[in-house]
Amino acid sequence: MNTTKPKRRLSRWARRLWPVAFWLAVWHFASIAIGHDILLVSPLDAGDRLIELAGEEEFWASIGLSLSRIAAGFVSALAAGTLLAAVSARLPLMRDLLAPLVSTIKSVPVASFVILILIWVSSEYLSVAISFLMVFPIVYTTMLEGIEQTDPDLLEMADVFEVGRLDRLRFIYASQVLPYFQAACSLSLGMCWKAGIAAEVIGLPAMSIGEHLYEAKVYLATSDLFAWTFVIICISILGEAVFTRLVAAVVRAIERTL
């Protein structure tokens, strides 16, 4: 019986888990040393509170609503960034027109956008707009770079053999640009989630993770703060892993058809 693979898998999990156990221990002893739950609760207390929250319907409803709003902004930014990058690569005038807008979005702090958008729209849609603004510049610039880096020899060959636009898109641009699309998704996903939650903390839409974080701060419920923060971390890690694998699977499927 071959036991090499199970041993390697166990060793890999051990390397991942022991740093987590170490920092949980540091957190626990730090909470004991401080001795004030308002300043720092122990991981055990935070875990107990998380279990209590998980038994409430509002807990899951808040997660679902926050996730759906931020996901809507993310997907919209992916579509808009990809489409406008394709247009800008084709029309230099469009690229010049969008350049100052994209630079401004990248430079303006999230808090400024939050305050400005709250003047225009309801707080319910704030995280959607903020997520869009955080993701759009990354997707646009990355996809534009990918399109512009397409091998000119392949394009010249397509001109010689009079390859149609759809075939160029399928056989040339798709294979050249897909790695840039993967990179854009990976770079923007975590930033989008954190910015969306930060927007909720300021805008306080009903039934959202940001609202619960703000309430934890107002009522000095440190255990709630750590419990919700743990939820944010888990969703970020899990969401990024699932979406990255989904994109990779789609990319592989597309590449097999090329």
Image (cartoon, grey):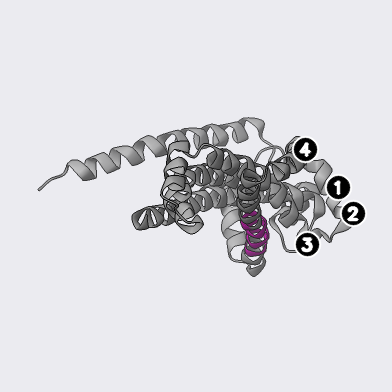
Across and down, in percent, residue 254 comes to: 40, 56
Tag on residue 172?
none
Which class describes the residues within 10 Å of circle 1: few (<14), some (14-19), or many (20+)?
some
Q: Which of the 4 image quarters holds residue 63?
A: bottom right
Front position in the image: 5 or 230: 5
**Does the segment drawn in magenta span residue 1?**
no
| Residue corresponding to mark 3 | 124
Across and down, in percent, residue 178 comes to: 47, 47
| Residue corresponding to mark 1 | 115
Across and down, in percent, residue 109 comes to: 78, 38
Tag 3: amino acid:
Glu
| Residue corresponding to mark 4 | 100
Tag 1: amino acid:
Ile
Residue 212, above or below 89: below
**Which mark is nearer the camera, 2 or 4?**
4
For the point 67% across and 66% down, the residue is 58
Q: What secondary structure predominates along the stretch shown in magenta? A: helix
Tag 4: amino acid:
Pro
For the point 29% across and 37% down, the residue is 11
Tag 2: amino acid:
Ile
Which class describes the residues within 10 Å of circle 3: few (<14), some (14-19), or many (20+)?
some
Q: Whole-Å distance between the Cαs marked 2 and 4?
A: 23 Å
Across and down, in percent, residue 75 comes to: 61, 57
Q: Whole-Å distance between the Cαs marked 2 and 3?
A: 13 Å
Whether residues under marks 1 and 2 lie with C-beta atoms below 8 angstroms apart, the answer is yes
Let me know if residue 246 appears in the view. Answer: no
| Residue corresponding to mark 2 | 119
